[in-house]
Amino acid sequence: MATEKNNIPYKIYLAEDEMPKAWYNVRADMKTKPAPLLNPGTGAPMGFDDLRPVFCDELIKQELDNDTAYIPIPQEIRDFYKMYRPSPLVRAYCLEEKLQTPAKIYYKFEGNNTSGSHKLNSAIAQAYYAKQQGLKGVTTETGAGQWGTALSMACAYLGLDCKVYMVKVSYEQKPFRREVMRTYGASVTPSPSMETNIGKAILAEHPGTTGSLGCAISEAVEVATSTPGYRYVLGSVLNQVLLHQSVIGLETKAALDKYGIVPDIIIGCAGGGSNLGGLISPFMGEKLRGEKDYRIIAVEPASCPSFTRGKFAYDFCDTGKVCPLAKMYTLGSGFIPSPNHAGGLRYHGMSSILSQLYHDGYMEATSVEQTKVFEAAEMFARVEGILPAPESSHAIRVAIDEALKCKETGEEKTIVFGLTGTGYFDMVAYEKFHNGEMSDYIPTDAELEASFASLPKVPGQE
């Protein structure tokens, strides 16, 4: 049985007075700032007034702020955070023992709230600013359902209406996640749907499609911009979301500093970038300022490899091509990923912040097949006692791989990874894995080239 070593407990919690009082904006320390959003019609950079029909006013200010390093967290949001924060930083003693590795493995566990994931950190912030603006409600998309669940919770708490467009394959694979959203009062529609003009167009072009986050975003934006008193909110990708999620990294760093622990490797799963960006932000800040160096690894599905096989280019953020253009690593807005079981990672692009950092060489990326991901998830569940979400299990896979490399070399590296949430609503995926019915689909070069061909023509872009 594993035991505590060197007086470092299994779970490290912060005291209330050690909790972050401000979010950290990593853009303030980036030498090359993320490229601005562009108007899809004119190609001009979008400012505050351009974004007002879609987003809440205060969130637009956060989205456009490249210079303010620390943005105070409103007291009302900090009070809400106290219901489930601080989240624990856990030493994976049992996993270390199972692997017989000299590596020290830690994970930041974000699944200790009813939504089951880190998404609540930004959901409550975005709902709060919508309420402050006097709006009636918000619209959004969701992939695996974690963001939709978190936003429905936040909206119920604040008395806002919530309309969720859920990627159809997840809607069908994860009915219980859908019912949690409905329990909190949200309406949940499988996307693409016949409720919107964009949904009808997508279904006409791709009959029987299982959908994508890009499709669902298009529908949610259409409804928000055509319904008085509503705005659109997004659970990943945007600068504002990574800002709110920095509470993860700030807590992680404070907990490590408390015991004098310095990580060598920091690992996070990557779909749109919210949890990865949040986890790495303060560490990346140190790296950007030249204070410390860390090896930072983004892990994505081999079936949706934005970083590892995508292009760094301006692209639409949605399949319906109504959202602004963002410069990011992308597979093309028309790319419809295979219906793998890591629904939250089925997005064609990646955060502009993370894309710029990756492009500039401050972090690395790798992709993994889902059967290998579920092998790691099962091992983790058996030894650490937590059933991990398929998304998080991408980070677990690479953390295990890095720990096994340490076993081969004898190096005592310290590994930290993000465990974004639990997998209790993902049992269809676990069932497919256990029954030997899970496949590893990897898009061909020809499929990706066909998708790249639809990238918008932007001056200066190849």
Image (cartoon, grey):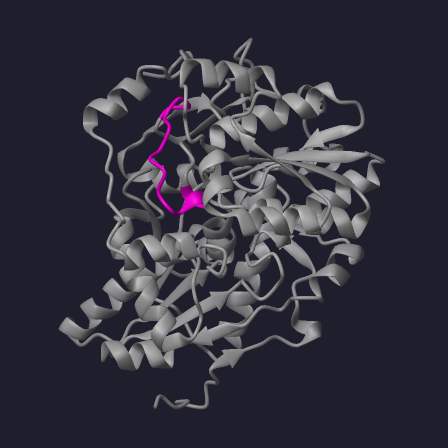
Where, by quadrant of the figure, is residue 331 drawn? top left
Write down the region rendered in magenta: 332-345
Which of 23/109 is in front?
109
Residue at image point 51% right, 40% down: 171
Indicate whether residue 336 is drawn in magenta: yes
Q: Is residue 349 above or below residue 178?
A: above
Q: Looking at the rendering, in which quadrant would you find the C terminus?
A: top left
Q: Measuring 56% from the left and 62% from the top, which residue is drawn there?
A: 250
Residue 202: % across, % down: 47, 18
Q: Is residue 159 above or below residue 194?
A: below
Q: Is residue 441 shown above or below 3?
A: above
Q: 328 above or below 406?
A: above
The answer to whether residue 309 is magenta is: no
As drawn, is 263 to the left or to the right of 285? left
Q: Does residue 152 appear in the picture of this structure?
A: yes
Residue at the top extreme? 42
Predominant SS of the magenta segment: loop
Q: In this view of the protein, can residue 122 be seen by the observer? A: no
Report the front residue among 109 and 433: 433
| Spot occupied by residue 337 in the image (x, y as percentages of width and height) | 35, 33
Q: Quadrant of the N terminus?
A: bottom left
Q: Position of residue 151 (x, y in %)?
A: 66, 46
Q: Nearer the viewer, residue 449 or 21?
A: 449
x and y percent of residue 141 in the render?
57, 35
Nearer to the camera, 210 or 326: 210
Q: Residue furthest right?
A: 134
In this rendering, position of residue 341 left or right of residue 57: left
Residue 409: which quarter of the image? bottom left
